[in-house]
Image (spheres, grey):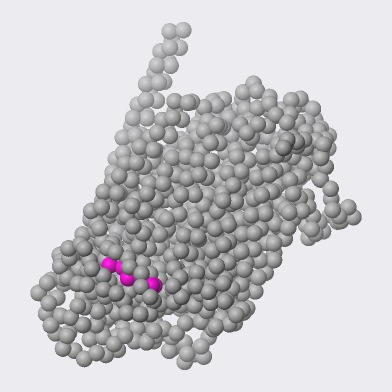
Amino acid sequence: MTIVNYDPRLVKTKNPYPKGPNDWKRFFSFNTDAKVIGIQYIVTALFFLLIGGLLGMLIRGELITPPSDLFDPTVYNGLYTMHGTIMLFLFLFPILSGLTNLLVPPMIGAPDMAFPKLNALAFWLVPVFSIILLLSFFVPGGPASSGWWSYPPISIQNPLGKIINGEMLWIIAISLSGISSIIGAVNFVTTIIRMRAPGMGFFKMPIFIWTVLAAQLLQLLGLPALTGGAIMLFFDLTFGTSFFRVEGGGDPVLFQHFFWFYSHPAVYVMVLPVFGIFSELFPVYSRKPLFGYKFVAIASFGITILSLVVWVHHMFYTGTPMWMRNLFMFTTMLIAVPTGVKVFAWIATLWGGNIRLSTPMLFCLGGLFNFIFGGITGVMLATVPVDIHVGNTYFVVAHFHYIIFNTIAFGIFAAIYHWFPKFTGKMFYEGLGKIHFTLTFIGATLNWLPLHWAGLLGMPRRVASYDPEFAIWNVLASIGAFILGVASIPFILNMVSSWVRGKSAPPNPWKAIGLEWLLPSPPPHENFEEDIPTVLNEPYCYGLDKPFVEDEKFYVEKSLKKH
Amino acid sequence: MNTKIRRLKKKNFSNTFIIIIAVLLNLLVSLLMGYWSYSWLPIQASEAAHYVDNLFAFETTIGTFIFLGCTGTMAWILVFNRAPKYDESNGEPLEGNLKLEIIWTIVPLILVLAISIYSTGVNNKLENLGSKIKYDFGSEVPFVEEKKVFDYGPIDVISRQWNWEFVYPNGIHSSELHLPVNKRSNFRLITEDVIHSFYVPAFRLKQDIIPGSVITYSLTPTKEGVYRLRDAMFSGAYFSQNQTNVIVESEDIFLQWINETVKKEPQNGLNPAGRLYDKRLRNGNRGWATVKPAPDPKVNEVGFEERPHDS
């Protein structure tokens, strides 16, 4: 069979609805333009960030005092379960899919994604499973309340014995989320492998594209395990089968293997694109080439491969034999190597640069600072004896949030600010951005730094009440959480008012190198249309006499003309 | 020309000097943090605690050194490499340095290898975990032959939603766990419903208790006192209440307790979750669904829910 090389210049994506809306209404339609879908994802995800954040603040409200005095413990358990679920499956995954949708086609010079209709389907599953998940608040017995891990037997106890219950809706929502992500992954991988601009070999791709490819391959490899596990759990819960049900000879620990086989790599699915964002932004704001481009690119795949063989570190005290503990401790530790390569490369990129501290750069620096800290506590958790003491305590909660919020969400904010002018055609207000960063950094640090000590002293995670000796750390954390809540106000204000009334943005406000910056702001429907540039070098040649594309001047002028 | 070379040499010398001072300072602060890290942990009350704390202090020292090294460099860059306003010129166009990149791949590799080897050594020394035997859930829990040497036991640790019960070899049932100091005690960890976790922070030890499996576990308390035993694996509505006390006492006092308790009549043991659930029912059963707490265990030794504890 001969593979026909795809030439994006010869293919135009068809709009299935030629008479479809082309104004703001397009964001509420089954539009197949990746840029529209990207914004749909991002706005939906940010809405759920607010909902998840509100739940987080309610949790911290309960924990500001030792006794369980704000909610009934059952309500508290439902709130923390939904907080975790919403933040991961309705905020982080969708927002990263949104950024990927926005950035991948223009960055590689493709007119759209490889499968535009599938792309729209992947997005429209999000509101569907979001509604299913939110509906679970209103079913008898309340929403799922066995944590976002949903470990059996606790998750299949079904106290009311009703067929339709919160846990069941939770499993359906998570399975649909898995299907949506698998569809998305197929699309991203195909697009990146088959639709790059002429001349853009693998080692001329932006690092963001490398990391997206690594992350989406991970989705394809890991997600079927979780989805399969979730379906088995559904059968156990609804039909009384015994995959994990102990009474029928099932094994509850088996679910933990299914769950963590995907859910640990899931953290890398989320963090890899953020590493890509850091790699894109540091060169721009320090006006320097990315240090060790090839090493950084290969490290992404190193992380992908290693992250598939670390899941048992979540199960060090479930009775796993010693050889298994030692083996998975070693593989988990090894992840520090490719990750370290990236961190050192970013610092080397900054070294001797001409640093400009605009809002995206502040979020990147804050994210990197937090990531170094979170990475170190991660290595501590990888060592079995320390993990046996602090596992399942607030030390883990603190470490996890240092990665998931203080690194990943910081990177996401950096990306939103950095590419906001490109995709909205408007500049944001720098002052509001800086206020957002300052409040977020202070709030996040105050929220999660003290919790390390609560965990070291032995405060278990997921408790609704605790012994008084942990009070001081929890008070500090709660204050931090409320500051984080306040931090969202300047952000929303900035985004909405800038988009509506902001100064119009030039095609390349940051003087960045990259295919997307050769397009007008906002880019036209099919990006470069027939005029796709031929790429000559990787997009980090700041200060080097190496042109990025053939006839760069022509594209710059063209983007200015349209502007 | 000579002046230029001299100036360069002077600059290199001062840079080297600054780097040496920074590294030494970093090393000093890291060692102090490592030393200080012992105070972040609870009392050391078992044979495992000392090993775990040493490993944690070692990791804290290395971690602090790396953290301050990286963030200190970032701070230096932010102070000295900031672009003046309206300056859009490029920085130094360095694309990479193969030697440097190989070094920063190899050094972390050696470092994590060293930590892994150290941790493996600690794992092998502790050997708390015995065998894990599956059985038909709901039937008689099988007796498990413990191959390793122990001084006292096996004590059955029975976990439920949401109370703890301890059954001693002579048939005593207790809501609190009494242990002799400096003697290796052996347990059979059993759960009657969901996964729980046997966690005593002062011992630095934790072991999940899996339904359908009986797990043997041994430990040696090394300090007399009262310590909290907390369920560390989320087990449902009243998970937070699933705590009790571990009382470590001298062997004489422990044996005296055994002899006195065996004569006590069984009565209702500690069950704070049961009381909370009754209160909930009295208030109209508001809240989201929960399974009913297990009934009060029948024990010879009730103990105290609100006992002052050392950790």
Reply yes or no: does residue B214 show up in magenta: yes
Instruction: Give the vertical position of A479 relative to A533 (above or below).
Output: below
The magenta segment: B211-216
**Residue at the image point whose x is 54% and y is 63% from the top:** A229
Q: Nearer the viewer, residue A432 or B231?
A: B231
Residue B69, horizontal then vertical, whole percent: 40, 38
For the N terminus of chain A, give its image quadrant.
top right
**Residue at the image point whose x is 61% and y is 55% from the top:** A93
Judge left or right: residue A321 versus residue A266: left
Residue A500, horizontal then vertical, whole percent: 77, 53
Decide if residue B118 is in sight here.
yes
Decide if residue A374 is in sight here.
no
Residue A161, image quadrant = bottom right
Say how many tags the image has.
0
For the C terminus of chain A, give its image quadrant.
top right
Residue B113, horizontal then vertical, whole percent: 34, 41
Judge left or right: residue B184 versus residue B203: left
Residue B28, image quadrant = top left
Reply yes or no: does residue B249 show up in magenta: no
Q: In the current view of this chain or complex, which residue is farthest to the right?
A: A19
